[in-house]
Amino acid sequence: MSAPPQNPALAAAIASTTRRERTTRAALLAPALLIILTISVLPLGITLVYSFLTPGTYGGVTWEFSVNSYLQFLFDRDIFDDTLSFNPAYLSIYLRSIGLALGATLGALILGFPTAYFIATKPREQRNIWLFLVTLPFWTNLLIRTYAMLLIIRDEGIINTVLMQIGLLNAPLTILYTDTAVFIGLIYSYLPFMVLPLYASLEKLDFNLVEAGYDLYANRLRVLFHVIVPLAKPGIVAGCVLVFIPGLGAYITPELLGGGKKLMIGNMIAMQFGASRNWPFGSAAALILMTLVILVLLVYARAARRKEAVHD
Amino acid sequence: MTEGSPAPVLRAFRRRDLRAMPGFKAMAWLCIIALYMPLAVLIIFSFNDNRSVVRWTEFSLDWYAKALANDGIRNAALVSVKIALFATVISTVVATMAALATTRTRGFRGQGLVYGIINQPLMIPEIVTAIATLSLFALIKRLTGVTGVGYLMMAHAAFCIPFAYMPIRARLETMTLTMEQAAADLYATPLKAFALITLPLLGPGIVSGAMLAFVVSLDDVIITLLVAGPGETTLPIYILGAIRRGITPEINAVSTILVAVSVLLVVLLFFVQRRMQR
Amino acid sequence: MTNTHTGTVLADQGSADAHRPAAVSVQKLSKRFGAGPFAITALDAVEIDIDQNEFFTLLGPSGCGKTTLLRLIAGFELPSSGTIALQGEDITALPPHRRPVNTVFQSYALFPHMTVAENIGFGLRMLGKSKAEIGTVTERMLALVQLEALAGRRTDQLSGGQQQRVALARALAPAPRVLLLDEPLAALDLKLRKSMQLELKSLQAETGITFIFVTHDQEEALTMSDRIAVMKAGRILQVGNPRQIYDRPEHRFVADFIGDINILEATVLEARDGVATVRLKDGTKVSAGTAAGAAPTGEVAIAIRPENLRLAGEGESATITGTLENLVYFGAASNLHLRLPTGEDLVVRVPGTFAEGRYTPGASLGVSFQPELTRVLA
């Protein structure tokens, strides 16, 4: 308990300072919070409500409660006798998406780790240039980068043309509109997300430990897997989360490179708000996606917190 | 230098950097090539004097001329810039205010929640934000009957806030309160200290934030695709439609322009931040 | 330079200048950070009066509250309770921009987007002075710190020492009634620090402004100050001029913190009129001075500086006899490390080569204590 200040002017000053700080803070925060809460958070509530309604005939919703959206996710309703039969179509889209996102994460890690390590061992001036080169594509339009990838892997694309011209192929290798194309596109899109956090943790790595490893008769592979990788783990986990999450919700990549046939969750959701005109089902699908993402983030946050606790 | 070249053993030792891992350098270069090759091809064939986006014939600016003469593209570009400017101004102003509140006042209860809300647009998959925003706007439109490009502008402003907020907050965190205290010590009122000290020092952070917001707004596809009403076609949406209709070098030309604008801004940003570090 | 206030102790203050209020008067000043069970008390009911024209130093280890006290006087923080008065005027609740005191920050806090001249003129500009006046004062200040040639430079192009001078000139330009200096020399290298110490001291004499100087460097404090307040854990332990602090420490912490000192456990036998007779652990009786007005009893410690001990010559009576364990030569002086019959160690300092060849480890040496330089610690 703090004794009340005897000096009345001081008491007034303390009170008014605290009050002024509170009002200033509230006033400064209000616009940003208001915009994000109304335009980004409140709509999630509406989505939740919509997911329990009935689709309108021309899009939108009719205000009738229904859990059909969630049932539809797993079952088909027979239009004659109303019985439910298991339909794995939507579930398989989710599983495919998870598989593709995981694959892309692994691919980005295999490409990104050596890259980040290489950059971290460069002299400081060169590091900035390399980092800049890695980040720059991220700031160019994702749609355009995906389109550029499409130009390359098409049947008539540069890769097939060159390979056929030098005689390695006699018929074009079909990549576009396959899972491989989506997989390549996802890695290409999100590789910078992998390299940056990896670099951040490798840059802090004390390379004396690497030397100590060699000093204690470890060979390169052992040093890599027993010294460097464990120390870079926070970066590896962060990078994987940063690639997996946008990969799971990808829209443009499967849209262009999967040709709309190889659907991922993102396209399926968008379709419900377009041609399929089933907003409630789209809402439910979106919430399921969001739940998956939040689960990943929660696991990540817990792992990060546990790590902090160990370090304290 | 009087001594001769070092003994061969010593030279071999020097060349062998203990930190280097075999193959990592090749992998790094492979990554850079993979990241840039597609863009390079896209840009090169925008200058091709041919309908093909594969076979090179001759240098020409025809596709740029065609693209610039295309009313659809011109309108879309105008819409894009209008929305991006609006979103940039709104998001930068509110993000600056929020960054001041979270760094220039003492820690407060609910600080974590505030960070969470500000970064919320980054944590939710864009497709989810897109359909949720669409649902909200559809509801408001039905209730009020008000339509217009304002909805899309506000949607952009919202998801630009965290991007503008990050560099501004980072800048403020490197600025200790000592500068403002020194100003107050030298008889500057809080308002004067803010105008003469805080704001000028924060300048590079605000510029960075605004640039990021502009690039992010200019590049957005998913939210715009779902939320945009008729006649609110932005450049990326126009390009998406054009790709679906069929690939032409004209798309390459527009894309190259858009990439050039983003790259230019980001290169500028790189130099602003380099100056900031000094 | 002679300062009439040098040597004034807290007890007989006021007699010199009864009509003139203290430059800074701090009463019952407390500062707690945080609330409830986790609150940290940075300052605990601190009381000091700092005279006009005084070079007053707050000395103590990091975390002792010296910087907090300075920041409260500057107005960067509000105290939890107590008052701060400037020449009799209560300024406890005033915001920093309304207090006629200026600060030299440890990090200098020069405005990086302004030139040297703009930095120096900033305070006057905020006070609404005319351009002409700002110009004249700035020039005078530049001359004072010998930086005329650098007026148009940006502050990030200056060396550490130059930045330090700019910070000083900037704080002096508005002619504050009190100048607060928060470890301003800490970032400078040793040689520069030494010359800046003398410069600061003469600057203070020249300007006649009261300086309150914060440092953790005891040597710096002894060199520059008229008076020193030694602080620990949010409290002021002792206030006095450098000689008093050095020769007559009243607390074990003060004795230990400043210079080298021998501390021996003792029991008080009798104390009267500022002199106590104590018994060491081996029964030796020693006379030692006590703090004014203190009447120590029971278990205490006595302190004596190595250079205040004398080796007893042949046939002279010694206070105590010890065995020489070690002899450490370090240029201007040598330290003799003795083991006393009490089991404690005693260090005696003798001039440079005095001990050379004269004593060998294992020898028995008699040592005399001078009662006036031996102190009983609280």
Image (cartoon, rainbow, N blue to C red):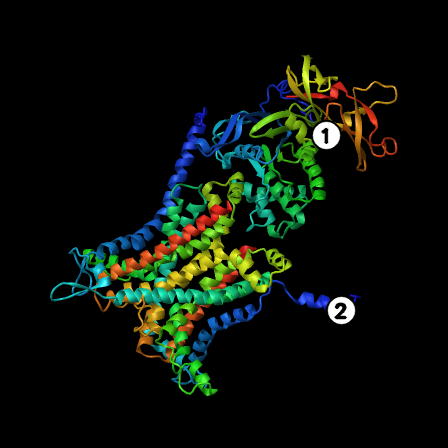
Q: Quadrant of the C terminus of chain C?
A: top right
Residue at 19% across / 55% down in the picture? Answer: B143
Question: As drawn, is A237 to the left or to the right of C185?
Answer: left
Quadrant of residue A169 in the image?
Answer: bottom left
Circle 2 residues within 10 Å: few <14, some 14–19, many ≥20: few
Q: Name the residue nearer the viewer: B179 or A193.
A: A193
Note whether residue C8 is visible.
yes
Q: Nearer the viewer, mark 2 or mark 1?
A: 2
Quadrant of residue C300 in the image?
Answer: top right
Q: Which mark is residue B5?
A: 2
Q: Is residue B238 above or below residue A222?
A: below
Badge 2 amino acid: Ser
For disc 2, the chain is B
Between the residue at mark 2 and the residue at mark 1, the CA separation in whole angstroms equals 63 Å
Give the structural element (helix, strand or loop) at label 2.
loop
Question: As drawn, is C358 to the left or to the right of B213?
Answer: right
| Residue holding disc 1 | C1
Badge 1 amino acid: Met
For disc 1, the chain is C
Percent coordinates x, y for residue B21 in the rendering = 58, 66
Q: Name the residue nearer the viewer: C264 or B184.
A: C264
